[in-house]
C-alpha cells in the first residue's frame, strides 16, 4: 500500500522528529452509506544508529538499505463500514483519536523507529534474498 496517497488531512508530530500522516481513503459504497478508511503512515529513514549493537553497524545498515530501501514505512489502515453520510467526518475523527490514544504511546518512544526498522529487516530475512 506504499503508493501515493495524496495530501494528508492531518499530521501529528511524534518523538525524534517523526510525524504520523493521516490520509482519507473513504468512499461511498451504497446509497448514503460510506466505508471510512484512514491510512496512517510514518516514514522512517534507515539510519546507522539503529544498528549500533550489531558487530558491524555499517554493514548491517547497508544490508537493511539494500533489502528495504532508504526509507521504511509504518502503515496502518483504520476502517469502519456502513457509516451514514451525516457521520462521515465525526467517525473519521473518532478513528484517528482512537489510534492516537492507543498507538501513539509506543510510537512516541525514542526506540520505536529503530525497533520497527530492525523488525522489518528480520521479516525481510524470512523472505527471498535481494539480488546483489
Image (cartoon, rainbow, N blue to C red):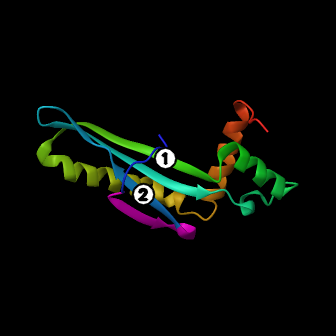
Residue 76 picture location, percent across and down: 45, 45
Residue 49's quadrant in the figure?
bottom right
In the image shown, does 12 or 58 lie closer to the viewer? Answer: 58
**Classed neighbour count for the residue bearing mark 2: other residues with Cα under 10 Å, few (<14), some (14–19), many (≥20):** some
Q: Secondary structure at mark 1?
A: strand
Asked if the residue at tag 2 contacts the one at tag 1, i.e. Cβ–Cβ closer than 8 Å, the answer is no
Give the image location of residue 96, x and y in percent: 34, 54
In the image, residue 15 lies in the stretch drawn in magenta: yes
Element class at badge 2: strand
Tell me the CA gap for discs 1 and 2: 10 Å
> Which residue has dot 2 on it?
21
Q: Residues within 10 Å of mark 1 (few under 14, many from 20)?
A: some
- The residue located at (53%, 63%) in the rendering is 108
| Stretch of the chain drawn in magenta | 8-17
Left or right of 54 on screen, residue 2 = left
Q: Residue at x 41, y 64 (%)?
A: 12
As drawn, 74 above or below 11: above
Q: Nearer the viewer, residue 46 or 122?
A: 46
Say above or below: 8 vs 78: below
Query: Which residue in the structure is indicated by mark 1?
Result: 75
Where the C terminus falls, by quadrant?
A: top right
Residue 21 part of the magenta-drawn span? no
Which of the marked residues, 1 or 2, is nearer the chain's N terminus?
A: 2
The percent coordinates of residue 61 (x first, y second) are: 76, 54
Amino acid at each position: 500500500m506504499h503508493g501515493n496517497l495524496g495530501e494528508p488531512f492531518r499530521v501529528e508530530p511524534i518523538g525524534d522528529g517523526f510525524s504520523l500522516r493521516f490520509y482519507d481513503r473513504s468512499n461511498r459504497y451504497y446509497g448514503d452509506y460510506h466505508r471510512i478508511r484512514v491510512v496512517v503512515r510514518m516514514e522512517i529513514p534507515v539510519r546507522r544508529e539503529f544498528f549500533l549493537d550489531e558487530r558491524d553497524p555499517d554493514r548491517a545498515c547497508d544490508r537493511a538499505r539494500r533489502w528495504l530501501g532508504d526509507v521504511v514505512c509504518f502503515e496502518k489502515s483504520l476502517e469502519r463500514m456502513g457509516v451514514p453520510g451525516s457521520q462521515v467526518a465525526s467517525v473519521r475523527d473518532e478513528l484517528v483519536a482512537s489510534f492516537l490514544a492507543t498507538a501513539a504511546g509506543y510510537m512516541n518512544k525514542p526506540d520505536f523507529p529503530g525497533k520497527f526498522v530492525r523488525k522489518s529487516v528480520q521479516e525481510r530475512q524470512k523472505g527471498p534474498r535481494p539480488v546483489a
